């Protein structure tokens, strides 16, 4: 969702910016643009569509000479995707250029005031007000102008700003939208995310809310809104640029699916110590864990689906009541949080606006928040009281796969920790669970190796109009994720239903040939789900079953069966999701969809 890259240094800025923006493509965008100072003035080039168009227009940056510049990929919020709405935006004199990630909430009021003062707007964007406001307040001191603007705008923003009067400098500022700064001795960089600059430097500084950065080719300084300089630590990024590249796979999504055995091992491994689970980051003693009376899990999209699985696992294994909320609902529903409540916010990116707002809501009410987060140093990771990282590495495909799998593991670990402390499982059961947890990576590998069979099956459904996913209990949780995967990347309408609900309306949607994917991994519920499969099959549905090895009985009710290896009943989602991911992927590939960047979607949803 909108990407920013800026450079000032010894090298040509435009090729570096284009390269950086390409590495942020996963965030989702519909237009792109760059502003570069050429020694006399600031030039802007923009284009609608893929970044490739901007590269072609500028001959890979060659037509925009200069060693300082800012670039942007825009994901339209205010105003359609168009050249005029694409960033950067200029003031009327074309001396100040701005790129913006986020939303200026009071832009209409500000636009009205600026219009009354004689400013003319060319775009429909909220961002353009920033360029004109900077112009209005600029009296020769960029910092002064930026600070005055910050005091007047409401909303979220990460900004990169060029002042033609200060060609040896680049300015940046953020509030509630991610921004990092890097330097390598030859120049300095700004970006929305680390992969954008990893090729040039591993030394990164995370900019906090309402901090202003002033960069030159020698280095950078960070100030607060009172223009006082701040000491900012830098961190060294350990992971490789290759980790964020395709490594020979056709799509990032496929590569990331194949990374799941490693991801699962990386998330679980360091927290399994002998015959115990140790989650130091929890920051809670056994006594404190015992005091937890209820858990609230809050998240969006797939992270929410991981939370729904978490509910079944935590309640089933550790007997703690769990409530799961969509973050966009939680933040506005005045949730009831009582003494003994623990709040867990799950997020891959750590930047999802609703999840961040939910975290703040819980903290404001005096509750501690545990973040289950993938992106190190992200906003949720920094604002949560404690962070359990999922260690999935950079996830580039918009549709999550490995980060979701890692979230499941984090939740299993938590449930196991709670169950041990609360004595809800025996020592023997606990040891068996540990064994099953350790075996998951190999079992996932096995399922991935079965991809050709699933691809053949998926090819039959390229023309499907709709697909239903059904399950009971924990299998309902995985049905939700399976359904989301399919619809988001293949654009086939799909819904997940608790199988017992079919009779209450949904079954009327079943027609001759409708594909119904039934997830049946819970032996205690086999008979129940088999009845539901028979119900849809007798109304013409083609039934695909995902079940555990040995459950041959299901073959009488299913048209096609995918078996998953035997594991603990609480861990089956980690295996059942693999064929469902592969199915969605191959349907989308078969349809010729842009698998890694589905239409209208963004990887990091930093606006509400
Ligand atoms: C679906 C998907 C989204 C995210 C959701 C939350 O494949 O990726 O549904 O799960 O936008 O994002 P994070 O986890 O970054 O908070």
Image (cartoon, grey):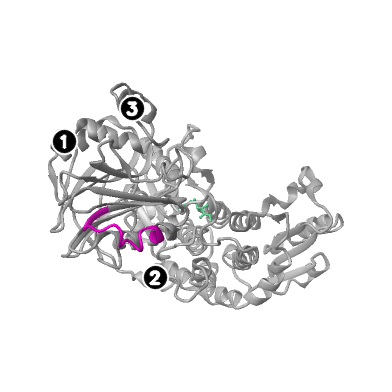
- Residue nearest the viewer, comparing 26 with 136: 136
Separation of disc 3 and disc 1 at Cα? Answer: 18 Å
Residue drawn at 72 percent across, 63 percent down: 461
Camera-near label (1 vs 2) is 1
First-in-chain label (1 vs 2): 1
Graded by Cα atoms within 10 Å as few (under 14), some (14 to 19) or many (20 or more), the crowding at tag 2 reads some
Kindly identify which residue carries mark 2. 243
Sequence-first tag of 3 and 1 = 3
Taking the image as shown, residue 275 lies to the left or right of residue 145, namely right
Please name the residue that numbered disc 1 is placed on: 144
Whether pointer 1 and pointer 2 mark residues with C-beta atoms closer than 8 Å, the reply is no
Coordinates of residue 595 in the picture (x, y in percent) = 55, 62
Q: Element under label 1?
A: helix
Q: Main secondary structure of the magenta part?
A: loop
| 576 in magenta | no
Looking at the image, is 369 positioned above or below residue 285?
above
Label 2 and label 3: CA atoms lie apart by 43 Å
538 lies above or below 358: below
Q: Gap between marks 1 and 2, in whole Å?
A: 41 Å
Residue 279 in the image, given as x and y percentages of width and height = 38, 61
Q: Which residue lies at the image location 48% right of the left edge and 32% below the top edge?
A: 334
Residue, disc 3: 110
Which element type, helix, strand or loop, lies under badge 3? helix
Q: Which residues are magenta?
A: 55-69
Q: Secondary structure at mark 2?
A: helix
Given residues 453 and 525, the one toward you in this image is 453
Q: Are marks 2 and 3 in contact (CB under 8 Å)?
A: no
Height in image: 42 above or below 280?
above
Q: Which residue is pictured at 25% across the width and 50% down the height?
A: 207
Is residue 559 found left or right of 76 in the rendered image? right
Above/below status of 165 relative to 28: above
């Amino acid at each position: 969702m909108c990407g920013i890259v800026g450079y000032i240094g010894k090298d040509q800025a435009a090729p570096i910016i284009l390269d950086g923006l390409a590495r942020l493509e996963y965030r989702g965008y519909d237009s792109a643009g760059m502003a570069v100072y050429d020694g006399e003035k600031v030039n802007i080039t923009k284009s609608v569509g893929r970044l490739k168009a901007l590269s072609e227009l500028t001959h890979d940056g060659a037509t925009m000479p200069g060693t300082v510049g800012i670039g942007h990929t825009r994901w339209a919020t205010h105003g359609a995707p168009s050249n005029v709405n694409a960033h950067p935006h200029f003031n009327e004199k074309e001396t100040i250029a701005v790129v913006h990630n986020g939303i200026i909430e009071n832009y209409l009021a500000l636009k009205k005031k600026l219009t009354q003062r004689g400013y003319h707007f060319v775009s429909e964007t909220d961002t353009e007000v920033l360029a004109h406001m900077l112009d209005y307040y600029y009296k020769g001191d960029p910092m002064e102008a930026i600070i005055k603007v910050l005091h007047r705008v409401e909303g979220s923003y990460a900004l990169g700003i060029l002042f033609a009067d200060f060609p040896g400098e680049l300015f940046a500022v953020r509030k509630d939208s991610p921004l990092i700064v890097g330097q390598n001795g030859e120049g300095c960089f700004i970006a929305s995310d680390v992969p954008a600059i990893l090729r040039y430097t591993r030394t990164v500084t995370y900019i906090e809310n309402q901090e202003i950065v002033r960069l030159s080719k020698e280095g950078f300084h960070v100030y607060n809104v009172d223009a006082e300089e701040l000491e900012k630590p830098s961190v060294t990024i350990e992971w490789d640029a290759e980790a964020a590249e395709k490594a020979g796979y056709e799509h990032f999504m496929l590569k990331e699916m194949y990374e799941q055995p490693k991801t699962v091992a990386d998330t679980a491994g360091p927290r399994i110590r002998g015959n115990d689970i140790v989650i130091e980051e929890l920051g809670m003693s056994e006594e404190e864990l015992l005091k937890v009376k209820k858990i609230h899990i809050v998240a969006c999209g797939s992270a929410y689906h991981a939370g729904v699985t978490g509910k079944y696992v935590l309640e089933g294994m550790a007997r703690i009541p769990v409530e799961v909320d969509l973050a966009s609902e939680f933040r506005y529903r005045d949730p009831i949080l009582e003494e003994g409540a623990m709040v867990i916010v799950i997020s891959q990116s750590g930047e999802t606006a609703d999840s961040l707002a939910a975290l703040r809501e819980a903290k404001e009410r005096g509750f501690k928040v545990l973040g289950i987060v993938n992106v190190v140093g992200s906003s949720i990771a920094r604002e949560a009281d404690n962070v359990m990282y999922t260690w999935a590495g950079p996830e580039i495909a918009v549709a999550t796969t490995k980060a979701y799998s890692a979230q499941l593991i984090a939740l299993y670990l938590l449930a196991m920790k709670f169950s041990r402390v609360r004595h809800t499982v025996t020592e023997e059961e606990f040891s068996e669970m540990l064994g099953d947890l350790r075996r998951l990576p190999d079992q996932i590998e096995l399922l991935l190796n079965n991809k050709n069979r699933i691809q053949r099956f998926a090819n039959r459904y390229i023309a499907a109009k709709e697909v239903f996913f059904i399950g009971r209990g924990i299998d309902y949780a995985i049905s939700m994720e399976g359904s989301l995967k399919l619809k988001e990347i293949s654009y086939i309408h799909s819904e997940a239903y608790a199988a017992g609900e079919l009779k209450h309306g949904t079954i009327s949607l079943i027609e001759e040939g409708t594909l119904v994917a039934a997830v049946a991994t819970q032996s205690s519920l086999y008979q129940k789900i088999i009845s539901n499969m028979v119900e849809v099959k007798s109304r013409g549905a083609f039934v695909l079953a995902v079940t555990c090895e040995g459950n041959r009985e299901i073959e009488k009710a299913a048209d096609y069966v995918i078996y998953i290896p035997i594991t603990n009943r609480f861990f089956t989602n980690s295996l059942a999701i693999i064929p469902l991911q592969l199915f969605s992927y191959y349907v989308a590939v078969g349809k010729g969809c842009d698998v890694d960047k589905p239409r209208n979607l963004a990887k990091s949803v930093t606006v509400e």
